[in-house]
Amino acid sequence: MERPSYAELVDRLQSATEDLGGTITERAEADGYPLYHLELPGPRNAPRFLLSSGTHGEEPGGTTGFLHWLEHDAAKWLRIFRIDAFPCLNPYGFERGERHDAAGRDLNRCFREENPPPAVRMVREVLDGTHFAMAVDMHEDCDYFGFYVYERLPKGPTVAPALLARMALEGPISHGEENDGLEIENGVVRMEWPQDTSLTELAMTRDKWPLAFFLYFVADHVITVETPGRQPLAVRVRMQRAAVETALSFTRGRLGL
Ligand SMILES: [Zn+2]
């Protein structure tokens, strides 16, 4: 399996979205590429679910996995959820296999900037005033052989146990490795924060926000999944699809739907 070109990606996203009765809208332009926001309709008053991918251009499994999920798995969820997606937030990097945008910026550190890159501005504007039951940010870690997840949730059941059980069917799980000084334990990045501090309060103590920190303000539950870049793309795409499926199943159960 190879990643599609951006033009092919957009073609396939458009036709799959149309088949599902949704809309795909160009909302901004970055480095000469159109940026898209995808909306899939749900029942009236349906809980909302958000997917984002392609913030880092050298992580093609996120965007490619989203495309395959949309083409093969999405339809059944539209009876329950209203789903929004940003399928590729850094087309310049996606085309070139580069992490940063054309100006050399890591978009996943720019979500608190006053004058952010176009993709970041688009996400903030589109999500202003929204509320999601869950948001999944789809990433890859190019140095890793195994899957891991970031999940901060002050209370309530976490999705990690179900997610890691499902991932283990597709490939290895990271364990005992260190990532930016944080230890990964059985596929979960160990993150401690004061128990009396909410996630939005935690975000306000930091200067450089990844998308996940911004999402704390609009979603009840936020996870960042990281598929292992050292596995073949086909494995990572299966993992990304299965991660989205598991997150949707978990949220349906949590909401009693
Ligand atoms: Zn990433």
Image (cartoon, grey):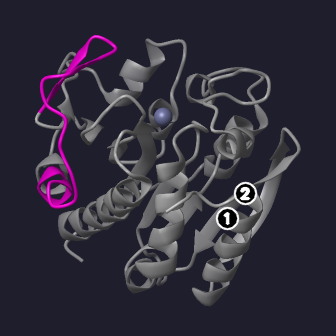
Instruction: Measuring from the top left, give residue 174's x and y in whole percent.
Output: 19, 35
Specify few, some or many for label 1: CA neighbours under 10 Å numbering under 14, 14-19, or 20 or more. some
Position of residue 153 in the picture relative to residue 83 (left or right): left
Q: Residue at x 72, y 67 (%)?
A: 8
Q: Quadrant of residue 20?
A: bottom right
Separation of residues labelled 1 and 2 (CA atoms): 5 Å
Quarter where residue 202 is shown: top left
> Hey, what amino acid is under mark 2?
Tyr
According to the picture, the residue beneath numbered tag 1 turns out to be 9
Q: Which residues are magenta?
A: 164-185
Q: Secondary structure at mark 2?
A: helix
Q: Reply above or below: 113 against 29.
A: above
Q: Quadrant of the C terminus?
A: bottom left
Q: Amino acid at mark 1?
A: Leu
In this view, the residue in front, 144 or 11, is: 144
Residue 151 shown in magenta: no
Name the disc covering residue 164, or none: none
Dot 2 corresponds to which residue?
6
Q: Are marks 1 and 2 in contact (CB under 8 Å)?
A: yes
Report if residue 174 is visible in the image.
Answer: yes
Q: Is residue 75 above or below residue 114?
A: below
In terms of depth relative to the viewer, which is nearer, 48 or 235? 235
Residue 64 screen position, x and y as percent: 53, 59
Q: Position of residue 216 (x, y in %)?
A: 42, 37
Instruction: Residue at 27% x, 39% y: name it.
Output: 149
